[in-house]
C-alpha cells in the first residue's frame, strides 16, 4: 500500500515537521570500527550522502568529527550541506545530564549544533542516575561509579535508574532546541504507547523523527502509520537486517535465511539488475521510510545510495508483505528490568535479565 507520493519516492530528502529537509538515506555508524569510520564518512560524502547518523556510545564520534573538520577546512563540503544526527545515551536521562550528554557529542564531532538529537532508548538503563556518563570514560561495561557508559552492579547486571522516566528527559531535550544546540529532537526504540505518551506531554517541540529497527522481516506497519498520522518521519536502522550482527551465531531469522539471501529478494535482484541491498533500500524509501544502512566498505557505501534510478512495481511492493515475520534482532534484553523497556512483548514469559555481555557491541545500538 502506497501512502507517499511518487515525488517522495524519488526525492532524496523529506521535510520534517520543523520545516528542515532530511536526506532519506543516511550513513549508519553503529559497529563501524575506530580507524575505519572516518574513511567511511569520506567515501559516503563523496558518493552523495548528506546525512550521517552518530551516537556517543558507538565510540567513533571523535573520528567522525576529525573527518568532518578536515572536509570542511578543505572546502569539499560545507556544514550547512550536511544533516548530522546523534543520540542521548541511556545513562544520561536525568534532566541535569541531558545537556552535558549533547555537549560531549558536539565536542567530539567538533560541531556547534546537530540537526537531530534523539533519545536513544526509552529506558534509563544502563544507568546509575548519579552523574553523566561519557564516552571518554569508556564505552564499555565497568563498576558503578567508574564513569563508564555501561555501569554494572556487583552481580554483573546493568545498573538501572528505575526512578527516571523519559517525559522528564523530553522536556530537557526541548530546552536544547531553544538554545540552538540541536535543530530537532526525536525518539529511537520507542513503542507506540511510549510515543503517544511523549506526544501528550510535549510543551514546545514535537518529535521530528522516530528511528527504530525496521526491515522486510520487521516491517513495523502500525508504527509507520502512527508516525504518518502524527507528522513524524520514520527512519529505519538495521534496514538490511544487520547480517553482520556479532551475535548472528545464535541463529538465523525464523525464515531460515539472512534477509539479503532470501530467495524472494534474490529473484527480484536478478530481475531488476540491482543488488539485494538496493532492492531492500528502494522498498524502504518507496513505502515512505528513511533508512540508515551501515557499511565501511566503500563499494557498498556507494551501492547503498544508488536507489533513485529505478522503482519497484506495485506487485513487487506487495510481495514484501509476505516477508514480514516480526523478527527483531536488536533486543537489548539485558536492560529489561527497567519499567520503560520497550519490547517486553518480545521477551519470553518470566524473562529475568541476566549478567550484561562483556562486549557493548552486542548489548545495544
Image: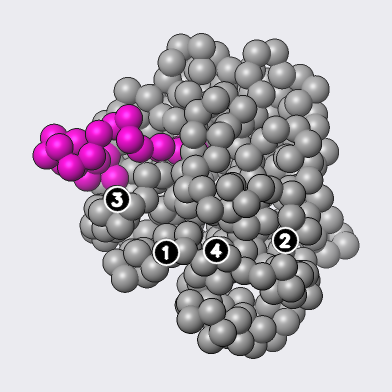
Q: Is residue 311 left or right of residue 256?
A: left
Cβ–Cβ under 8 Å for marks 3 and 4: no
Helix or strand or loop: what does disc 1 sit on?
loop
Residue identified by numbered label 3: 45
In the displayed structure, 281 sits above or below 198; it is below
Quarter of the rendering containing residue 241: bottom right
* Residue pictured at 78% horizontal, 36% vertical: 229
Magenta stretch: give its range.
64-90
| Disc 1: which residue | 306
Question: Which residue in the protein does label 2 denote?
Answer: 219
Label 1 Cα crowd, 10 Å radius (few <14 / some 14-19 / many 20+): some
2 and 4 marks in contact (CB < 8 Å): no
State the CA–CA distance, disc 2 to disc 4. 13 Å
Query: Where residue 143 sits: x, y (%)?
Result: 48, 44
Number of numbered labels in the structure image: 4
Most distant residue in the front direction = 6
Number of the front mark, 2 or 4:
4
Amino acid at each position: 500500500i502506497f501512502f507517499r507520493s511518487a515525488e517522495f519516492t524519488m526525492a532524496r530528502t523529506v521535510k520534517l515537521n520543523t520545516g528542515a529537509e532530511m536526506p532519506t538515506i543516511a550513513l549508519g555508524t553503529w559497529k563501524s570500527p575506530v580507524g575505519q569510520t572516518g574513511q567511511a564518512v569520506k567515501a559516503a560524502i563523496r558518493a552523495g550522502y548528506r546525512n550521517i547518523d552518530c551516537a556517543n556510545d558507538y565510540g567513533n564520534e571523535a573520528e567522525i568529527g576529525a573527518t568532518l573538520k578536515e572536509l570542511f577546512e578543505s572546502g569539499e563540503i560545507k556544514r550547512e550541506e550536511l544533516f548530522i544526527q546523534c543520540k542521548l545515551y541511556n545513562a544520561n536521562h536525568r534532566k541535569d545530564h541531558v545537556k552535558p550528554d549533547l555537549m560531549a557529542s558536539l565536542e567530539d564531532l567538533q560541531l556547534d549544533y546537530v540537526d537531530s538529537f534523539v533519545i536513544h532508548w526509552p529506558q534509563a538503563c544502563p544507568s546509575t542516575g548519579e552523574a553523566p556518563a561519557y564516552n571518554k570514560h569508556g564505552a564499555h561495561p565497568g563498576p558503578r561509579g567508574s564513569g563508564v557508559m555501561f555501569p554494572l552492579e556487583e552481580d554483573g547486571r546493568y545498573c538501572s535508574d528505575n526512578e527516571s522516566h523519559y517525559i522528564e528527559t523530553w522536556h530537557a531535550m526541548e530546552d536544547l532546541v531553544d538554545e540552538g544546540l540541536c535543530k530537532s529532537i526525536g525518539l529511537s526504540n520507542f513503542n507506540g504507547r511510549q510515543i503517544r505518551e511523549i506526544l501528550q506531554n510535549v510543551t514546545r517541540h514535537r518529535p521530528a523523527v522516530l528511528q527504530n529497527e525496521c526491515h522486510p522481516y520487521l516491517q513495523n506497519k502500525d508504527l509507520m502509520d502512527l508516525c504518518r498520522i502524527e507528522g513524524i518521519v520514520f527512519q529505519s536502522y538495521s534496514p538490511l537486517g544487520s547480517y553482520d550482527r556479532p551475535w548472528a551465531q545464535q541463529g538465523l531469522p525464523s525464515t531460515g535465511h539472512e534477509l539479503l539471501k532470501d530467495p524472494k529478494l534474490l529473484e527480484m535482484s536478478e530481475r531488476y539488475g540491482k543488488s539485494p541491498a538496493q532492492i531492500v533500500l528502494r522498498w524502504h524509501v518507496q513505502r515512505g521510510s528513511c533508512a540508515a544502512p551501515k557499511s565501511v566498505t566503500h563499494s557498498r557505501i556507494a551501492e547503498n545510495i544508488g536507489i533513485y534510478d529505478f522503482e519497484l512495481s506495485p506487485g513487487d511492493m506487495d510481495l514484501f508483505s509476505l516477508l514480514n515475520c516480526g523478527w527483531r534482532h536488536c533486543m537489548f534484553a539485558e536492560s529489561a528490568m527497567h519499567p520503560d523497556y520497550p519490547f517486553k512483548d518480545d521477551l519470553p514469559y518470566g524473562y529475568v535479565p541476566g549478567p550484561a555481555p562483556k562486549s557493548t557491541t552486542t548489548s545495544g545500538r
